[in-house]
Amino acid sequence: QSALTQPASVSGSPGQSITISCTGTSSDVGSYNLVSWYQQHPGKAPKLMIYEGSKRPSGVSNRFSGSKSGNTASLTISGLQAEDEADYYCCSYAGSSTPPYVFGTGTKVTVL
Amino acid sequence: QVQLVESGGGVVQPGRSLRLSCAASGFTFSSYGMHWVRQAPGKGLEWVAVIWYDGSNKYYADSVKGRFTISRDNSKNTLYLQMNSLRAEDTAVYYCARAGWTGTSAPGNWFDPWGQGTLVTVSS
């Protein structure tokens, strides 16, 4: 099972919206609406931002939203803020495959 | 509040063993599946293993299958990762993470929260 494909970097100015893509296959992203997204600041543990494709945990800003089309999931950050600068990872459930969970390659978000 | 604290990392020679622990607090540990996820220096996240809330099911990444064993002691609110036959490529920060709650016996397919991580360095 290969890692899900994400762009290495995405950038935007404060207040803008950006979208991070996460491309998998029909065995993972395409088969399940079970993609989660994590934010990781340098030297820190990852933090859950989106689960089950589009659900936001309590305490996560509504500027973060998730969606999916076919084998590609997306994370959109609207009203970009300086604190959003971090690495972002997607993760998909892959069913009975080995491994049952596969992470994306990660995207560095830079706020210009 | 919900807290996960890993321990047991360090420097170990190739071929040797190490056991990581993850102490849980602030929630009913025995009701949740638990994961280990690792991150090599400067690299992305890699899922390692998952264990059901009662230890009845365990799954592993191909890269660690046969060498690593995930286990838990619900009486001690602690998750473990026994790592044998360690290789240089196992060098990473190891995080424990709670599986999402689904209300069923199967763990939810997300990780929240995560511990702060413990660094394992495999080097001669």
Image (cartoon, coloured by chain):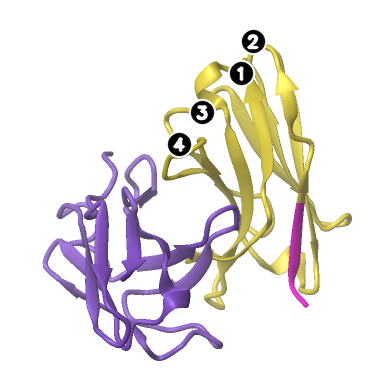
Chain colours: A purple, B yellow
Camera-nearest label, 4 or 1: 1
Horizontal placement of A94 versus A83: left or right?
left
Q: Earlier in the sequence, mark 2 or mark 1?
A: 2
For the residue labelled by badge 3, is the local secondary structure a helix, a strand or a loop? loop
Q: Earlier in the sequence, mark 3 or mark 2?
A: 2
User: Label 4 belongs to which residue?
Assistant: B61
Q: Quadrant of residue A71?
A: bottom left
Q: Earlier in the sequence, mark 3 or mark 1?
A: 3
Question: Mark 3 and 4 residues: CB-CB less than 8 Å, in contact?
Answer: yes
Where residue B22 sits in the image (x, y, percent)?
76, 50
Same chain for marks 3 and 1?
A: yes
- Residue found 68% across the figure and 57% down from its top: B115
- Residue found 68% across the figure and 55% down from its top: B116
Neighbor class of circle 3 (other Cα within 10 Å; few <14, some 14-19, many 20+) is: some
Where residue B66 sits in the image (x, y, percent)?
54, 23
Residue A50 visible at all: no
Count of numbered labels shown in the rendering: 4
Q: Quadrant of residue B114?
A: bottom right
Q: Earlier in the sequence, mark 4 or mark 2?
A: 2
User: Label 1 belongs to which residue?
Assistant: B86
Residue interval drawn in magenta: B1-5
Neighbor class of circle 1 (other Cα within 10 Å; few <14, some 14-19, many 20+) is: many
**Residue type highlighted by circle 4:** Ala
**Residue type highlighted by circle 3:** Val
Mark drawn on residue B15? 2
